[in-house]
Image: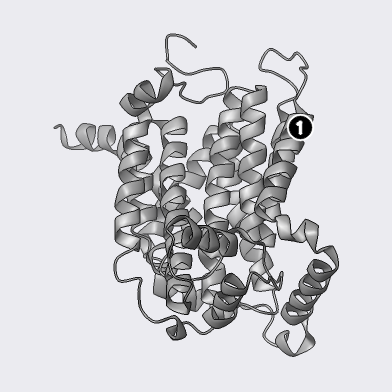
Amino acid sequence: TEATGHDRRGGIPDAHRGIAGWLRGPGWIALLFFVLTLFLTTRNNDYPYYYEKDAHSKVAQVLSGERNFYHPLLMLNGADAILRVCNLERTEHNAVVAGRWVMALCTAVAVAAFSLLGYRLRGPLTAISVGVLVMTDNLVFELAHFFKEDPALLMGLALSFLAMQHFWERPTRGSAAWLGAACALAVSGKYVGIAAFVLALALLWMARKGADGQRRAIPWGIFLLSFAGLAALINYQIILRIPEFIGGFAIEMNDVTRPSKRKDIPHIGQAIDVFDKLVHPWIFLLAAFQIGLTIVRRSRRPVEWMLFFYPAIFLLVLLFSPRLFTRHFLPVIAFLSVLAGFGLPALVEWGWPRLKRRYDW
């Protein structure tokens, strides 16, 4: 283990302690992608709010302080916080631009987190490959410019997967708290982010037995307390207005499941059209190579398996969802780019020695 530089959980341990040491390691890569993504996704994001179909109701909630609870409150409360912290005039235009900045920040954090995940699993080349492919993904880039909750969900998922890998490497109280907080961000982005919480529970259960076969105590309480505490802090209006939350949630569920929207289920044609327009064939090929590599090598790192099981299951849910828009494919398409980011350096590592032998280079 010490000779290879990897710990018994298969991750790459931090070489240094503290912020300065972190920046000498993977930190500079994450910071670079965060800054680049934030710069790219905040260009020309100040177009009028009425250009967005659903922005009016969200703007009204930010300005009035009321909430309809159709979605969790990370995006709306984040936009309100920006208006207050920056002391901006509470106008419709400022509210929607603040919301777009929140989504751009979420996207930047997601790209940085996925890049860090690549570093922890495979090293700096994979971190750069993952960061570039996710940052330049068409749908990831586009949705960062809208006052829509999808990038908030992606951020929560990215942080949850990074936190799960961190816990798998070091199952400490601190990593359990981080994992709970990351899952809280996922469910505070969109209600379907509860999937991150379910995956985390599965990983905690698998971590009960160490590499030496000995059972160990898992800090379940810290994980749950961190999750509940941050989720309550972000969505505090839900606690204060439980009847209104139940009513708003019921309205949203009735809308997305009403019979008039079920006629085209499963949405195979729509899915094919979305992938054809937004995903380049070589992304599919690189992702398939990474999936095949994980299966052939029988990876012992649960996160590597979750990286393709989660989007596959999510896609299946989308195909049978009565209400489906292109933006709902964001987790699936983003995770394809993540898998492709893992697959590219792995393909080079696998193919380059064979090319050298084949052509006697």
Identify the residue shown where x is 43% and y is 72%.
Answer: 94
Disc 1 element: helix
Q: Amino acid at mark 1?
A: Trp
Q: Position of residue 302 (x, y in %)?
A: 62, 36
Question: Tag 1: Cα neighbours inside 10 Å, few (<14), some, or many (≥20)?
Answer: few
Of 332 and 236, the residue lying toward us: 236
Identify the residue shown where x is 47% and y is 21%.
Answer: 13
* Res 270 → quadrant: bottom right
Residue occupying the far bottom of the picture: 260
Q: Quadrant of the C terminus?
A: top left
Q: Position of residue 190 (x, y in %)?
A: 64, 61
Q: Answer above or below: position of 72 versus 325.
A: above
Q: Position of residue 162 (x, y in %)?
A: 53, 38
Identify the residue shown where x is 41% and y is 33%.
Answer: 119
| 267 left or right of 36 in image | right
Say if residue 300 shows up in the picture: no
According to the picture, the residue beneath numbered tag 1 turns out to be 205
Identify the residue shown where x is 44% and y is 80%.
Answer: 49
